[in-house]
Image (cartoon, rainbow, N blue to C red):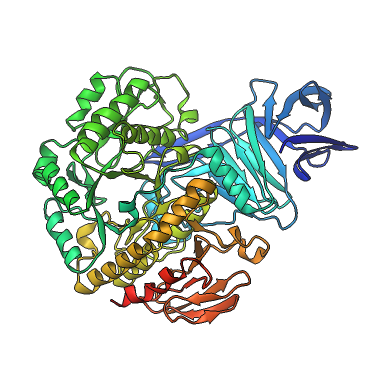
């Protein structure tokens, strides 16, 4: 569909089909312009960004010119609006103006989603969302003592909108989507029900508009636009990836999982290159090679990996785009010109990551991208048999450094996760491993979809809290899926443990129930493993993990079907209810349950102490309860949910119904 202009007495509409996208009137001008005065501060990936715009202009008059529309202030053209195909471009004519606010049309009761991976809210109405990749924060709720304490200790508390993976794309229940094609700082603002506003820190903005007759078509268009992931390999969906980081003893501990009956597809040892103890907890030594530290911690690692492979178990590791100043690779990287530099001299720009400093690898430089992909990810990891890794971070690019390509770090910051994903995908492709080796990322931005095969939801707190606990995993997967990310998963058991906040057995059990219904099931020991329960801390927890890993493995044929749908239709594996039931507005804000494909409905228990929960069964056909076999008509029910039996339902008429019916037997074994 193409955008078209409809002139009116007091303004004009830009429409796509019969849908108004942007409406300019005297009383509500579509564009506001200003000059910016920004203040940006960063502490360990946590940013404070503010602006004091001045010389604000709100042009009301307009006139049609060649190629578009001029907006006038006091009779003088100040901005130009051009449109072609599904693309809308807005440009300030005075180059001193570097702030734009574009007001897109909104209908009453129109629901809005998107924004990348949003952890707190699926529906964005009534709130604004800065688009800036960063640490999400610990607590993410300004009313809590934990968030307040973390803020005081280094701006580390976060808020509802903080996310590793923002994206300036929104979808609406008129089945429209608008994407800002830019990497600069921006804000999606839905606080005014009359408009969908986008603030852009630039004097020019290019938007792409998409339209469909329903959400399935809209999501498919966006997945085509941003790139579709390769199908996950059989090994990744056929069992659990056990995360252990106790050095060579990790191999012995893995045998306990196997002996307990767990379906194990991989062993993930993020500490493969060494560890560093800090006040935050057990950190990794950021020096990505199998040198002395690696050999001390994991002797004969290549041989160990080969032994696991012979048993059908893959080995996974860890890397990020920073190198510690006290690491062996640092001098090689510095000599090769692979680091970002200070603004005022040629020294390496160092970033404090919490009791250790690192150089930032400069991915704007082709030689550096090639070096990291080949020298580190290729030779040090893939060539010794590593089949996947956590490609961590990507959010930390400071705004006060010098990049090799001469670009402004404010513009490059949001692009950094995409460059990082490209480097990882390049390494995998160089060994012919695309679709077999799997790296997973938490950081992202527009375009990461075409490179990163798997998201993970980042560093949740080890609790049930509303904005940083287990429930945010669901919201993150659903929101990211709407903008083209087919596969998401989480740290089973959670990650962040600070100030006495530690795992409970209940949390560990409930997280297993949730993780089994994600495309990949992977556990994590967290940042303070010695202070927290692990899945091999007791026979009961080990048995719990084993049972749900078998559930995950049992569903592999269905997940393979979902992978086909993702590849062919651009549909995510985990889906909000409205994706298949768009005619029921009551489903638009549901974010605590999801459709796993079209045929399974999963309602995880994400409240501490809950032994039942409200479940919405949508549509018109019957839903069958997995554990009892009882059929339910569509509606809303309070369903019993003891530990070990989260509410899960399936369509009896599904071609996978026999597989789903077998879940009860798997769980009872």
In which quarter of the view is residue 559 placed?
bottom left
Horizontal and vertical percent position of residue 94 = 68, 20
Check the image and report above or below for 568 versus 349.
below
Asked if one can make out residue 159 in the rendered structure from this viewpoint, the answer is no
**Residue occupying the point 56% across, 32% down:** 182
Classify the position of the C terminus by image quarter.
bottom left
Classify the position of the N terminus by image quarter.
top right
- The residue closer to the viewer here, 185 or 6, is 6
**Residue occupying the point 18% across, 33% down:** 327
Asked if one can make out residue 56 in the rendered structure from this viewpoint, the answer is yes
Horizontal and vertical percent position of residue 238 = 32, 57
The reply, left or right, for residue 340 in relation to residue 227 is left
Check the image and report above or below for 62 versus 537.
above
**Residue occupying the point 43% across, 81% down:** 628
- The residue closer to the viewer here, 87 or 157, is 87
In which quarter of the view is residue 359 placed?
top left
Report the number of numbered marks: 0
The reply, left or right, for residue 424 in relation to residue 202 is left
- The residue closer to the viewer here, 483 or 598, is 598
- The residue closer to the viewer here, 639 or 96, is 639
The reply, left or right, for residue 533 in relation to residue 179 is left
Horizontal and vertical percent position of residue 57 = 73, 31
Horizontal and vertical percent position of residue 52 = 59, 35
């Amino acid at each position: 569909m193409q955008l078209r202009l409809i002139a009116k007495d007091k303004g004009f509409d830009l429409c796509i089909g019969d849908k108004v996208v942007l409406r300019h009137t005297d009383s509500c001008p579509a564009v506001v312009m200003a000059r910016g005065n920004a203040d940006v501060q960063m502490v360990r990936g946590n940013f404070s960004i503010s602006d004091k715009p001045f010389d604000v202009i709100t042009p009301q008059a307009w006139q049609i010119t060649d190629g578009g529309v001029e907006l006038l202030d006091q009779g003088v053209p100040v901005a130009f609006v051009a449109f072609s195909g599904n693309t809308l471009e807005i440009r300030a004519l005075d180059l001193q103006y570097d702030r734009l606010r574009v007001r897109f049309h909104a209908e009453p009761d129109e629901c809005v989603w998107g924004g990348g991976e949003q952890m707190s809210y699926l529906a964005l109405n009534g709130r604004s969302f800065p688009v800036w990749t960063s640490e999400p924060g610990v607590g993410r709720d300004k009313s809590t003592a934990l968030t307040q304490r973390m803020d005081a200790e280094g701006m580390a508390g976060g808020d509802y909108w903080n996310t590793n993976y923002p994206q300036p794309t929104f979808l609406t229940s008129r089945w429209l989507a608008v994407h800002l094609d830019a990497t600069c700082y921006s804000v999606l603002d839905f606080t005014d029900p009359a408009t969908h506003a986008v603030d852009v820190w630039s004097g020019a903005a290019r938007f792409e508009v998409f339209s469909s007759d329903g959400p399935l078509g809209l999501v498919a268009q966006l997945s085509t636009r941003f790139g579709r992931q390769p199908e996950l390999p059989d090994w990744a969906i056929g069992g659990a990836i056990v995360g252990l980081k106790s050095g060579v003893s990790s191999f012995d501990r893995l045998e306990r999982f196997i002996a307990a009956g767990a379906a194990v597809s991989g062993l993930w040892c993020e500490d493969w290159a060494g560890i560093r103890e800090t006040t935050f907890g057990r950190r990794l030594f950021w020096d990505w090679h199998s040198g002395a530290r690696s050999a001390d911690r994991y002797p004969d690692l290549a041989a160990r990996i080969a032994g696991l492979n012979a048993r059908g178990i893959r080995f996974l590791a860890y890397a990020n785009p920073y190198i510690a100043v006290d690491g062996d690779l640092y001098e090689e990287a510095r000599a090769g010109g692979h680091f970002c530099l200070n603004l005022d001299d040629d020294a390496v720009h160092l970033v404090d990551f919490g009791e250790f400093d690192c150089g930032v690898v400069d991915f704007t430089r082709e030689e550096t991208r090639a070096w990291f992909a080949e020298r580190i990810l290729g030779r040090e990891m893939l060539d010794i048999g590593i089949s996947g890794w956590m490609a961590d971070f990507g959010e930390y690019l400071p705004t006060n450094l010098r990049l090799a390509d001469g670009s402004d770090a404010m513009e490059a910051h949001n692009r950094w996760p995409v460059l990082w994903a490209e480097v990882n995908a390049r390494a995998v492709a160089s060994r012919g491993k695309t679709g077999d080796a799997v790296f997973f990322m938490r950081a992202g931005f527009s375009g990461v979809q075409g490179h990163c095969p798997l998201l993970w939801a980042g560093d949740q707190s080890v609790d049930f809290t509303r904005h940083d606990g287990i429930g945010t995993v669901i919201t993150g997967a659903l929101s990211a899926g709407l903008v083209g990310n087919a596969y998401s998963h989480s740290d089973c058991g959670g990650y962040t443990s600070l100030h006495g906040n530690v795992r409970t057995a209940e949390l560990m059990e409930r997280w297993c129930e949730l993780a089994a219904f994600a495309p990949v099931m992977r556990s994590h020991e967290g940042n303070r493993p010695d202070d927290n329960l692990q899945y091999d801390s007791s026979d009961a927890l080990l048995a719990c993990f084993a049972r749900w890993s078998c559930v995950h493995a049992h569903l592999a044929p269905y997940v393979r079907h979902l992978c086909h749908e993702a590849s062919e239709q651009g549909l995510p594996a985990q889906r909000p209810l409205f994706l298949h039931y768009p005619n029921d507005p009551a489903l638009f804000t549901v974010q605590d349950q999801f459709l796993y494909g079209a045929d399974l409905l999963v309602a995880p228990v994400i409240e501490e102490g809950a032994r039942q929960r409200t479940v919405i069964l949508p549509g018109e056909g019957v839903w069958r309860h997995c554990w009892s076999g009882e059929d339910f008509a569509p509606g809303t029910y309070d369903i019993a949910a003891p530990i070990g039996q989260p509410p899960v339902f399936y369509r009896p008429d599904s071609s996978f119904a026999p597989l789903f019916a077998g879940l009860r037997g798997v769980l009872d074994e």
